[in-house]
Image (cartoon, coloured by chain):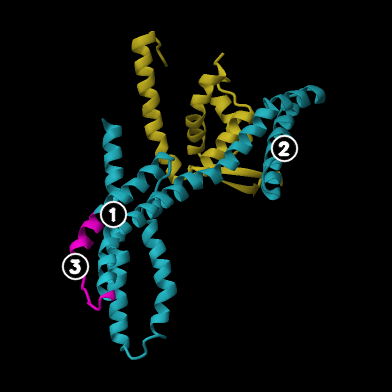
Amino acid sequence: MGTLRLERTEADEVVRELAGHLEECYEALRAQGVSEEAAFSRAGAEAGNWAELRRGVILVKEGRMSDRVKQIWIPSLVTLSGWAVLGVVIWSPLMWESWNAARRGVILFPPLVILYWPWLLSLIFIGAAGAYLSRRAKATGWRVYLSGAFPVLTVGVVFAVTFPFAFVVDAQVAPFFKITSMLANVVSWIVLPGIALWLGVVVEGMLRQKRVAD
Amino acid sequence: MIRTELKRGTAELAVLSVLEEGPLHGYEIGRRIAEQSDGALRYTLAALYPLLYRMEQRGWLRGEWETGPSGKRRRCYRLLARGRKMLKPMREEWVDLFRALRRVAKVTHA
């Protein structure tokens, strides 16, 4: 078999398993009355092409890593990039206006609500894109949903890291208001977007099934 | 004598079908398939083990080391729920295939 390009323990296990198979084959032939030499030769022939066996094992074991990349990481990167680009396209003109107004000493309350809902609905397409890429790489179940909803998981991590600081800074603000604000942020930037992304994943799945049925 | 290319296409269904009866280790899987097919389907290690590992990665099987009655440790494969669910559509696929072949190539099957 040569050297398997695997972790040492994994390679040892594969070799042990294959050796066990050949050993059983040899013992079965000997039990049938086949001579030692003939049994040894026939058991060895059971392996088929050794180079092909080695290639096949490595391809499958190494493929596990590339499967994760194709099924989870690339689709997740696409959904996260889509989320970021969409955010910049929709929110940045508004933020730019607010910032310019602030420089002039004018406090501008941007109509976030007007832009929030179109942004939220367009997340359905982002989630569907991630699900499409993940399923195209033959992913199923939680991998597809993870890829589709990856942006909100990222935001969740950021919130989990930064929110505790809110209790340290701005000591004048009552905890009740801080908690309410945090909950509002969680609902606005994690829960509802998460639902929109997952809706995209579900819709993509339904369209895929319909295509297969047709 | 069945060509290797044709046998390759049958291997997944053959493995899932013998494991439907209960967990087996690699040698027993090959032996059962050969026995139940009257020797028509024989898989070398090069055909069988990459397939078993691939099906394990898909979550269709789980392989675990067990000590047999003889005291030897063997890796036993057990059919999981996801693998069991694949049996019906795979069998239907083969029925459809034979039906189509019967029409086109005048092939009949037992």
Identify residue type, mark 1: Leu
Residue B80 place in picture, x, y as percent = 47, 45
Few, some or many residues within 10 Å of mark 3 (<14, 14–19, 20+): few
Judge depth for marks 3 and 1 and give the one in front.
Answer: 3
Chain letter of mark 3 equals: A
**Image: B12 above or below A197:** above
> On residue A111, which mark appears?
3
Q: Describe the element under mark 3 as helix, strand or loop.
A: loop
Q: Do labels 2 and 3 share a chain?
A: yes
Image spot of residue B30 (x, y percent): 60, 30
Q: Do labels 1 and 2 share a chain?
A: yes
Chain drawn in yellow: B
Subunit of label 2: A
Give percent across and percent down for residue A64.
Answer: 55, 44
Which class describes the residues within 10 Å of circle 2: few (<14), some (14-19), or many (20+)?
A: few
B24 sits left or right of A190 in the view: right
Q: Can residue B73 be seen in this view?
A: no
Task: Tell me whether circle 3 and circle 1 mark residues in contact (CB < 8 Å).
Answer: no
The residue wearing badge 2 is A19
User: Magenta residues, as a range?
Assistant: A103-121
Chain for mark 1? A
| Residue bearing the label numbered 1 | A123
The chain letter corresponding to cyan is A
Q: Nearer the viewer, residue B58 or A147?
A: A147
- Residue B66 is situated, as x and y percent measured from the top left of the image, at 64, 48
